Amino acid sequence: MAVTEPIRPQAGPQEQFLASSADIAIYGGSAGGGKTWALLLEPLRHIQAEGFGAVFFRRNTTQIRNEGGLWDESEKLYPVIGGSPKTHNLQWTFPSGVSVTMAHLEYDKTVQNYQGSQIPLMCFDELTHFSAKQFWYMLSRNRSMCGVKPYIRATCNPDADSWVAQFIAWWIDQKTGIAIPERSGVIRWFVKIGDTIRWADTKQELEEFTMTGEDGTQVPIPAKSVTFIAAKLTDNKALMAADPGYMANLMALSRVDRERLLGGNWKIRPSAGMYFKREWVEVIEAAPAGLRIVRGWDLAATPETGENDPDWTTGTKMGVDAGGTYYVLDHAYDRLSPSGVERLIKNTATQDGPSVQIDLPQDPGQAGKSQVMSMTKMLAGFNVRSGPVTGDKVTRFSPFSAQAEAGNVKVVRGAWNDRWLTELENFPPESGHDDDADSTAQAFNAIAKPLQPTAIFGTYG
């Protein structure tokens, strides 16, 4: 395929990232900032260098192969300059013999696969997904005999709890969590001694830190240079022109995810009150007719004795109209024995009627599967669906949170309202229970997605 026009980065942060001379350059911030393409462009400057090679890392292979991920995007770029794909091992080779490989580091121990390797260029896509242990070990494999000075390039979205947030703290306003514009692209130097990192503005300032050389004398520890370059969605003019609706997609996220992925906030964390406020929802006297309705459950099986504080079994009934407005219709809750839980779910199903879909969570392992199988048999005659619980609780609750904040959720007045509203305002709790939020998320995620085949035994009725 012939190249019809020059391949170049977009002006702004993408160009700055590709022009950096730092040993380690990290390009991070908002989703849609052009980070993946910047990373894919990086090895192209060396495809004529004999002996050069580059490896792109994601935490797992699925992330590499995802639509719009590294491999998918590389197929749009690398063939234009003569790249030949080897899909089975996720590798590109170029006419000069240079190769670019995409690989995973799914477990901390996976780094041992690279013992003895020398990789002139390492590219980490979503650096916050990797552990510090993985990064520092792989840094020891970043070496070169091909004439290209070894270096590392990385991209990431903000994550307040990652080791990366600490590593790039100098570039981030620690009060607001937002990158400091005048520091973006500024190079600093460090040496790492054990678990301690010593920083300086110049390489010379670190010469006091020494190690024993081959001749027994003390020599300076080689310092590494680092920079962080902030990216915003608005920096990616190509994406903004091709998909102007993407900004709206990010605006529709929950507040925490919106601050991270649109605002580039490195300090924002989930906390009570961030994911739900009662003023976001309107309490109404009755819901309209014609709703598609689901009751989602969160299951527990320990009765209250007066000396314990067990989890609650909760069931949230939710409907959606044709216009995409969601209605919370009812919320059941109790602390019961296993047989009591079964009676509660069966009695509630009878009251709701067979038109209401029942959505049951399936906990991991054989015990979770057996529990759902037993309950599905018990509920013969009702529309029962189930599936494995995936993702953490905050991730599962976030889609409902986003719709509530946008004003798309109404609540039918009932005696359960205050308890339900209070529990959701306290989510995620520092301690205590999140069962009400879990069943709410279970109902919402079931009703918001297209109908799927029933996981176990089909639909009864």
Image: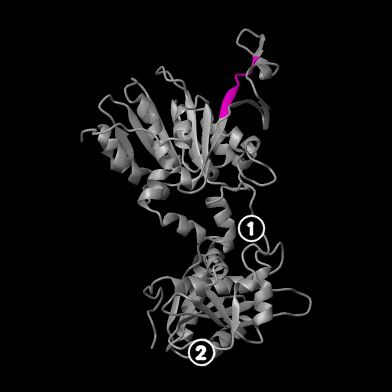
Near-viewer residue (399 or 376): 399
Figure quadrant of residue 82: top left
Q: Is the C terminus in the top left, top right, bottom left or bottom right quadrant?
A: bottom left
Near-viewer residue (121 or 280): 280
Q: Nearer the viewer, mark 1 or mark 2?
A: 1
Figure quadrant of residue 340: bottom right
Is 224 magenta? The answer is: yes
Q: Which residue is mark 2?
A: 352
The kind of residue on which mark 1 rests is: Pro
Q: Which residue is mark 1?
A: 270
Give coordinates of residue 216: x percent, y percent: 65, 9
Query: Is tag 1's residue or tag 2's residue first in the polypeptide sequence?
Result: 1
Position above or below: 432 against 212: below
- What span is colored magenta in the figure? 220-226
Position above or below: 102 against 404: above
Residue 59 visible in the shown view: no
Q: Secondary structure at mark 2?
A: helix
